Amino acid sequence: MTRLHLLTGAGSGIGREIARRLLERGDGLVLLVRDPAKVADLADLADSAGRTALTVVTTDLADPAAVEALAPPERLDSVIHCAGAVELGPVAQLGPEAWETQLQVNLVGPALLTRRTLPAVRATRGTVVFVNSGAGLRANPDWAAYAASKHGLKALADALREEERPHGVRVTSVYPGRTASPMQAKVHEQEGRAYDPAAWIQPGTVAEAVLHVLDLPGDASIPDLSVRPR
């Protein structure tokens, strides 16, 4: 039976690579995106595969009402949270919008989306994957808001893992180090540094780690997985 996954953040970076690999191997996908144009090439890939089901749903994780209005499938083999927002700055300068956006997209949105999709994941004894960040394990200067949202995401995953154990749902947090992506380019710009994508982890490397989590035999789970630049 073809497996079905719900994925956020497929417009670029790690999320796009996960989507591409899942489509290429024939899995079904439900993509939650703000801008469908960013995943048009993935739709073309699904069409060329012929046997792959792809559904694109336009929604905004920063809008709780939009997340609450979602109608997920009855069965999902996984929910993969890849969408993210970042805005660097010292606590003395970050305004409420920067805090609210990062907390909503990086933490509250995933929490609400998880709640909406849990019945479907329970139906398959499936997997919830949170693509976190090294900032979810430590906080550096100018990273307070982003790190707070990612520390919160770790707490969400840790609590969910124990809550869902009786239902057979596996929960994994993946903590990539700096990964070549449009978000990383933005971070370098905010840091005032030159950006060389070849210097960092490639998105496909993290995507392969996520697929390993999804494909793990049913007798084990991976609660936490860190991926660091070599």
Image (cartoon, grey):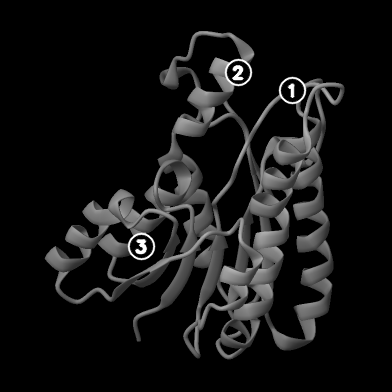
Of residues 115 and 93, the one drawn nearer to the viewer in this rendering: 93
**Residue 227 against residue 71 in the figure, above or below:** above
Q: Nearer the viewer, mark 1 or mark 3?
A: 1
Q: Quadrant of the C terminus?
A: top right
Q: Picture quarter containing residue 162?
A: bottom right
**Residue 120 against residue 177 in the figure, above or below:** below
The amino acid type found where label 2 is placed reads Gln
37 left or right of 9 in image: left
The amino acid type found where label 3 is placed reads Leu
Q: What is the C-alpha distance between the residues marked 2 and 3?
A: 33 Å
The answer to which of marks 1 and 2 sits earlier in the sequence is 1
Q: What is the C-alpha distance between the residues marked 1 and 3?
A: 36 Å
**Tag 3 residue:** 22
Q: How many residues crowd mark 1 within 10 Å: few (<14), some (14–19), many (20+)?
A: some
**Tag 2 residue:** 190
The amino acid type found where label 1 is placed reads Gly
Q: Residue at x 54, y 51 (%)?
A: 83
